[in-house]
């Protein structure tokens, strides 16, 4: 079994984070306090910490013809879960930084991917492989 990761990240507004991660992404909420909220992101613990001055990073790197935001975080999902999340995010009118699509077609790293930002500007990527055993495969 894969061990869950833990990630703490800054947000400028906890109510907006709660609405986005809990409402839009459907992450169950765990413990919380006045300055942080735990969320269950597909079995992983992410913690939104209040920083009213939080600013998103502006760095990008070119990947397969797109400007991928750095840093970013997310989860590798099963294909059907990825499709369902893409529809959920579209229905919530979230603006995609990189629209849902398949990159590296026909290669060992072929994957479905999408990028978008939370209300504080944190970049997220969700991806899926038709064959998860190819997660670390080289061409």
Image: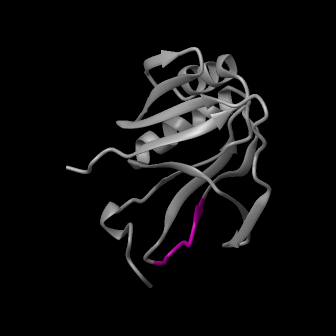
Is residue 95 shown in magenta?
Answer: no
Give the residues in magenta.
102-107
Farthest residue to the bottom: give it. Answer: 139
* Residue 46 location (% of width, % of height): 47, 36
- Identified at 58% across, 14% down, the residue is 34
The percent position of residue 14, horizontal first and vertical second, equals: 65, 21
> Who's the residue at 59% across and 34% down the image?
87
The vertical placement of 92 against 77, above or below, is: above
Q: Residue 82 placed where, x, y %?
A: 48, 44
Give the number of marks: 0
x then y, percent, for residue 39: 46, 27
The secondary structure making up most of the magenta span is: loop
- Residue 12 as seen in the image, left or right of residue 114: right
In front of the other: 130 or 33:
33
Name the foreground residue: 45 vs 86. Answer: 45
Q: Which colour style is shown?
A: one colour
Q: Which of 75 and 79 is in front in this view?
A: 75
Looking at the picture, does residue 67 appear above or below residue 120? below
Q: Which residue is drawn at 44% across and 85% down?
A: 139
**Is 105 in the magenta?**
yes
Left or right: residue 98 versus residue 74 is: right
Left or right, 71 with respect to 1, comes to right
Which residue is rendered at x = 73% and y = 34% of the image?
120
Depth check: give the residue in front, 38 or 81: 38
């Amino acid at each position: 079994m894969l061990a869950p990761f833990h990630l703490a990240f800054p947000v400028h507004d906890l109510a907006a984070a709660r609405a986005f991660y809990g409402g839009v992404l459907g992450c169950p909420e765990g413990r919380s306090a006045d300055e942080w909220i735990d969320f269950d992101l597909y079995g992983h613990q992410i913690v939104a910490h209040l920083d009213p001055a939080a600013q998103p990073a502006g760095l990008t790197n070119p990947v397969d013809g797109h400007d991928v935001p750095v840093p970013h975080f997310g989860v590798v999902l099963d294909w059907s879960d990825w499709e369902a999340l893409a529809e959920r995010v579209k229905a919530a009118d979230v603006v995609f930084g990189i629209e849902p699509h398949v990159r590296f077609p026909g290669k060992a790293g072929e994957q479905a991917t999408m990028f978008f930002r939370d209300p504080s500007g944190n970049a997220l990527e969700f991806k899926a492989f038709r064959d998860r055993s190819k997660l670390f495969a080289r061409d």
